[in-house]
Each structure stands twice: as structure tokens, then as C-alpha cells.
Image (tube, rainbow, N blue to C red):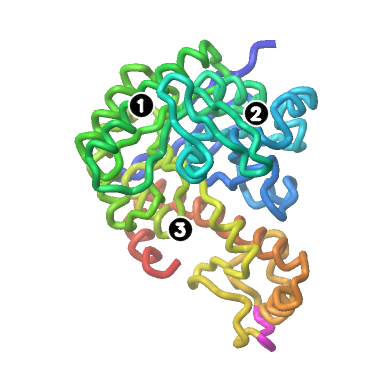
Amino acid sequence: MTLKKFVFNVLEKNKYSRCGLIETHRGNIKTPAFMPVGTQATVKAVFIDDLIKTGSEIILSNTYHLMIRPGVKRIELAGGLHEFMNCKLPILTDSGGFQVMSLSKLNKIDRERGAIFKSHIDGKNFVLSPEESIRIQKGLNSDILMVMDECPKKTNNFDLINKSMELSTYWADRSKKAFGLNSHKALFGIVQGGLFKDLRIKSLNELIKIGFDGYAIGGLAVGETQHEMFEVLDFIKDYMPFEKPRYLMGVGTPSDILGAVKRGIDMFDCVLPTRSGRTGLAFTWNGKINIKNAKYQNDNTPLDVKCSNLNLNKYSKNYLNHLFNTNEILASMLLTLHNINFYQELMSEIRKSIKLGKFDEFHDKFINII
């Protein structure tokens, strides 16, 4: 059986903001899209069926963490990541490149060999080369694969960022060769270059020469201000290929998403809604709520009166406050689901406003609220 090809089309445009459709053999993804993060083959505290009910159409998982536990061979023997975690949605897998930065105390970088890790679990040595990252992602059988890159920490050292960017370009070329011909899957390149305009544009142009199915912007959400992030998007937006999906990695807050959509971004992922849900922070159309706060004791109103999905409003702030303050597992489950649902409601409203040609009004109304 011939599997459906990976296809992306821009359907509507409102200045730089875009509505599009990614078509995969596992299902379609309306953009702008938010991808809940399932790092270790699970979106923490949420059933996949409930995730789908929120309107989520794709999730993200992580090569590095799955390589360490349970190991790619075990997932391959289960039939791939979709079968292993009982998920029918398309899955994007990160390459492990971010962990080169975030777990830097446990690794070293070698241009030819790749990232040499000591497992943060048991200290076992791993070598994650561009070819190995692609091999693992193929073994996981994900639908969108990412090239291996180095994601440096924020710095104003031009030479350091330039060296890192050139390494990422070299690894991207090797990743593309290892990926080969897979028309029903997609491989995204990752634009690096820190906060330097010329390096970002150079990185992007080199990736375009190699040729990818989509282009991600990496190296952000690593300590820069929101203003600095938007500046990067501003000076790169006119150079991004129009006909390819644009993915801003690891971002972010609702206002980050609004600002990035305004600058032409199509795809997002972030642990914020799930991590916040586990710690008592709720996102609503009226702003953030720390449900652990004593002022919510005896407040029998719902978290967000605008929420109409999944009967989430049947749980009061009073009850949720009680659950969190008694460390009940249900607290994390309910608030995580609420937050993911809010993010998907946000993406839906963003798409509607773009189609109506009113995204700027929507952006200006909510950018300082949510």
C-alpha cells in the first residue's frame, strides 16, 4: 500500500500570519498548530483520547529520552511509537539536539562523532550522531523527524554562535543524507544563529540549499527576552520559504504564540501547559490563575466560564484548590487537561481570526491578558 505523501499548503494569509494544512498519512494538522509534549511517550497526566478531544492533532516526543528509556529496540518490537503508546495522531520527534545544551554537564561535542552523552539516569555512555539520531527516529516511526543540531545557550559571543551554527549546518546535511527518500514522512531543518541576524540568515540559506520539508527556528527559549525572540522572527520572516511549514521550537506562553503567529510561524510546542498544570497554574481567557492561592477556597465558580469542552467546568476553583493542597493526583490530571484544552482553543481562535482577516485585532485584544 502506498502511503499518503507529506504535504503542506498555505490556505489563508493575513499580513504575515498564515492558516495552513499539513497532510500526513496519519491525519491532517490545521496550522497554526500547538503540539503537546509527550517527551517519554506520554503527555504527562493526560489520556490520549482526552488529548484528541481537546482538538490536538499532533504531539511531540523526544529521541534522547526514548533512546535511554525504554530504548528504540523495545519500541520497534512493539510496532513503533504510535502502537507503543496507543496514539493514532501524527508524532513529531525532536532530534536530541536540545539535550546537548540542557544536559551539557553530561556530554561533549565532537564534530564527526556527534554528541557524546552520559545518561542522566545511570551514567551509561551514548553517542548521538546525526545518522544515529535519524536511525532512532526512523525506528520510532515518527511522522516528522528533526535534524540533529547543537542548541547553544544564550550568549553574545559571535564566534561561539557562528561555530555552533556551522556545526549544525554540517550535521543537518548529514541528517538529510541519512534520512534518504521518505515521501510519506518529513524532515525539518533547524535554523540556528542565536540573536545575530546575519548568522540566522546564513543558516537558513544553507538549509534551503540542502532542502527540507519544513524549517524550524531553534536556539530560542534559552534565556532571551520575548522582545529579543520577536526581533529574531522579525528579521528572518521575509527569508523563510513561503511554501514550507515554519516551526518555532520550545515556545511558549500564549503571548509568545500570538506574537510569533503575527510573524509567520505555523507550529509550536512547549511543556508549559502540562508542567504548569501539574504545579497548580491554570491558563484562562482572563489570564493565569494560581489555583493553590487561598483566595480560591470557597470559590465555587469554574476556572474559565468560556470553556465548554470536556465538561471541565463542572470542577470548581474551590474543589481544585482542595485537590492541590492535599496532593491528589486528580489535581494534576484536571488542570493539565484544562491547560491543553485552553491552548487548543487559543489556536482555533487564532485560525478563525486569520481567516476573517482580523488577526491583528485578536492579537491586540489578548496579547497583554493571556
Residue 58 visible (yes or no): no
At label 2, which amino acid type do we have? Arg
Q: Is residue 293 left or right of residue 204?
A: right
Which numbered disc, 2 or 3, marks the residue closer to the eye? 3
- Dot 2 or dot 3, earlier in sequence: 2
Circles 1 and 3 in contact, beta carbons < 8 Å: no
The quadrant holding residue 341 is bottom right
Which residue occupies the foreground of this view, 367 or 103? Answer: 103
Tell me which residue sits at (45%, 66%) in the image.
370
The amino acid type, in three-letter code, at marker 1 is Leu
Residue marked by disc 2: 26
Q: Where does label 1 land, which residue?
A: 167
| Residue 46, percent from left and from top | 71, 53
For residue 29, the mark is none
Q: In the displayed structure, would residue 226 be above or below residue 126? A: below
Q: In the picture shown, does residue 353 fall above or below 5? A: below
Q: Earlier in the sequence, mark 1 or mark 2?
A: 2
C-alpha distance separating marks 2 and 3: 28 Å
Q: CA distance from mark 1 to mark 3?
A: 30 Å
Q: Callout 3: 10 Å neighbours few (<14), some, many (20+)?
A: some
The quadrant in which residue 65 appears is: top right
219 with respect to 97 (left or right): left
Q: Secondary structure at mark 1?
A: helix
Expressed as whole percent of the image width and height from the top left, the position of residue 289 reads 55, 74
Tell me which segment is drawn in magenta: 297-301
**For mark 1, does the 10 Å Cα neighbourhood hold few (<14), some (14 to 19), or many (20 or more) residues?**
many
Q: Which residue is mark 3?
A: 253
**Residue found at x 48% / y 55%:** 349
Question: With 57 as the anchor, is 21 left or right in this view?
Answer: left
Among numbered discs 1 and 3, the one appearing first in the sequence? 1
